[in-house]
């Protein structure tokens, strides 16, 4: 399924992501409600409507380039069957750094297939002249559940827990991020479906 919008802004802060079905959000919300009473009040939990898996952050892009982004998505996405997304753990992130987020971490096989999709997508974007920053590290599928600052690692309660949440992604979504005082707000601009196996 593909839908188009009237682009009227000069530049938009864009990214490409996989959004979550309602039943998966309910499972994650249970984990958030479990954590909220035990974590420091300064930990800011994101709203369920903002939960997604980011594959590629495009930054600020000109309106005139949005059609090229759309064309890139329409070229790359149908090359892949709908990927199975598995969430396996809740933990502090990012790994091997001073914690500043609560993550829902994807399974290794989820990171592998999404990494392949991400590489194909970004190669196509670059071929079409879209400027973006390419990360050299291996892709790690994760959802940011909450953010915090200034809490020493030794003061953080242990929260790591295994999860078993799974769904089949239907599309890659072009998203716009609008920065406000209350935090970022996200809107879906366009959906491009994965390959149909029918």
Image (spheres, rainbow, N blue to C red):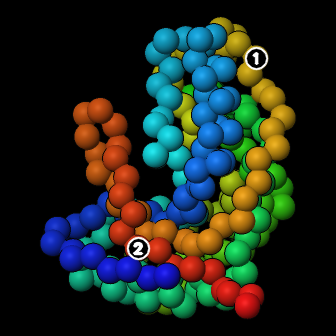
Residue 12 horizontal/vertical position (percent):
27, 64
Instruction: From this view, report whether residue 36 is shown above or below residue 82.
Output: above
The residue identified by callout 1 is: 158
Residue at point 54%, 91% (across, down)? 75
Residue 90 in view here? yes
Residues at marks 1 and 2, CA–CA distance in whole angstroms: 39 Å
Q: Does dot 1 land on a helix, a strand or a loop?
A: loop
Q: Nearer the viewer, residue 96 or 190?
A: 190
| Side (left or right) of 17 relative to 26 | left
Q: Is residue 115 above or below residue 42?
A: below
User: Of helix, strand and loop, which one carries label 2?
Assistant: strand
**Quadrant position of the C terminus in the picture:** bottom right
Residue drawn at x 55%, y 52% is: 52
- Name the residue tied to disc 2: 190
Tell me which residue sits at (29%, 32%) in the image: 182
**Do the residues bearing badges 1 and 2 touch, measured as CB atoms within 8 Å?**
no
Q: Closer to the observer: label 1 or label 2?
A: 2
Q: Earlier in the sequence, mark 1 or mark 2?
A: 1
């Amino acid at each position: 399924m593909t839908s188009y919008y009237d682009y009227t802004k000069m530049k938009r802060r864009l990214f490409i992501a996989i959004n979550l079905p309602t039943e998966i959000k309910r499972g994650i919300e249970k984990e958030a409600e479990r954590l909220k009473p035990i974590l420091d009040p300064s930990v800011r939990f994101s709203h369920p409507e903002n939960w997604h898996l980011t594959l590629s952050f495009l930054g600020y892009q000109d309106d005139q380039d949005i059609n090229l982004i759309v064309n890139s998505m329409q070229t790359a996405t149908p090359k892949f069957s709908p990927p199975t997304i598995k969430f396996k753990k809740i933990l502090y992130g990012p790994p091997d750094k001073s914690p500043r987020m609560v993550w829902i971490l994807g399974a290794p096989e989820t990171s592998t297939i999404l990494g392949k999709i991400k590489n194909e997508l970004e190669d196509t974007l670059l071929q079409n002249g879209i400027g973006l920053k390419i990360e050299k590290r291996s892709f790690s599928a994760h959802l940011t559940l909450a953010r915090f600052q200034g809490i020493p690692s030794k003061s953080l309660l242990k929260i790591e827990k295994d999860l078993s949440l799974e769904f089949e992604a239907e599309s890659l979504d072009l998203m716009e991020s609008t920065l406000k005082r209350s935090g970022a707000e996200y809107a879906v601009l366009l959906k491009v479906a994965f390959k149909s196996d029918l």
